[in-house]
Image (tube, helix red, strand yellow):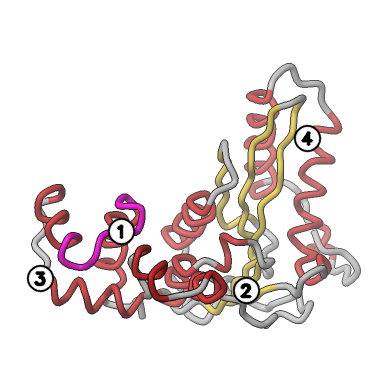
Amino acid sequence: MIDKDYSDYLVLYKVFEKSNKTYGYRRISYALLRDEGIVMNHKKVSRIMKKYGLVVKHTQLSHQSKTSRQLHDTTIVENHLKRKFNFPKRNQAWVTDITYLIFGNQRRYLSTILDLHTRKVVSYKIGLINSNELVYDTLHDALNKEKEVYGCILHSDQGYQYTSKHYQVICQSHGIITSMSRKGNPLDNAVIESFHSLLKKETLYNNQFTSIYDYVQSVIHWLDFYNSDRIHLSQTKSRHVFI
């Protein structure tokens, strides 16, 4: 079951981020009414901010050391997968990561979520910058497509997007269990590492592009082919391959 405060939190979060994390509950309540026409009692705003850990930046600077601020904004969780990459049903476990798409001196960033049962792409986003929003958008897209996700394990590395409070809130509010690789252990997320390697092998290394746009379009076409037509080696019942 989705946390009933979650939708209100998302509205508050946008205002909070827009203020560069300087608005307290009273200013957020006023901004919601002024800018969005949304009436939300300041006591409710205060409660939701406390519940989800939205702390005003200048308060942190006044009362917390740099180390404690970093700990407040960072969540490291244990590795629930433990290199177990085969699951009997959809939406029991997902893996996610970001990879570079480099052409010449230009680059784009591909954020992907894979299902460990089907080995298919649940969602992906391609962005100009490697940002929190790229990861959040990928996760929201997956949640819009897949409704039965309560109890699903979502495994990632310890990148700053995945350790962010907002990412953890999105997952927890949908009943998703976050899991992380140990530092310096890429094999803990071997499936998606293998997937991104395969993507580059079958797109960039097999074609001659004239622009980053052409390369990105090739990646998009390949992702569609991968999900709809490509024969996955896991379908051959081999236990020695990831993709």
At x 40%, y 70%, the residue is: 60
Mark 2–mark 4 distance (CA, rounded to whole Å): 27 Å
Q: Are marks 2 and 3 in contact (CB under 8 Å)?
A: no
Rate crowding at label 2 as few (under 14), some (14 to 19) or many (20 or more) other CA atoms within 10 Å.
many
> Amino acid under label 1?
Thr
Question: Can you name the residue that lies furthest to the top here?
Answer: 210
Question: Can you name the residue that lies furthest to the front here?
Answer: 62
Q: List the residue tagged with mark 1.
A: 22
> Amino acid under label 3?
Asn
Position of residue 119 relative to residue 41, above or below, is above
- Residue situated in front as seen by the camera: 234 or 29: 29
At x 58%, y 65%, the residue is: 162
Q: Secondary structure at mark 3?
A: loop
Q: Is residue 144 left or right of residue 162?
A: left
Query: Which residues lie in the magenta part?
Result: 18-27
The x and y percentages for residue 15 are: 27, 55
Q: Give the numbered dot on residue 41.
A: 3
Sequence-wise, the earlier of marks 1 and 4 is: 1
- Residue situated in front as seen by the camera: 214 or 230: 214
Q: Nearer the viewer, mark 1 or mark 4?
A: 1
> Amino acid under label 2?
Ala
Sequence-wise, the earlier of marks 2 and 3 is: 3
Sequence-wise, the earlier of marks 3 and 4 is: 3
Q: In the rendered image, which quarter contains the C terminus? A: bottom right
The x and y percentages for residue 1 are: 36, 80
Rate crowding at label 4 as few (under 14), some (14 to 19) or many (20 or more) other CA atoms within 10 Å.
some
Q: List the residue tagged with mark 2.
A: 93
Q: Secondary structure at mark 1?
A: loop
Mark 1–mark 3 distance (CA, rounded to whole Å): 19 Å
Position of residue 209 relative to residue 160, above or below, is above
Q: Nearer the viewer, mark 1 or mark 2?
A: 1
Q: List the residue tagged with mark 4.
A: 203
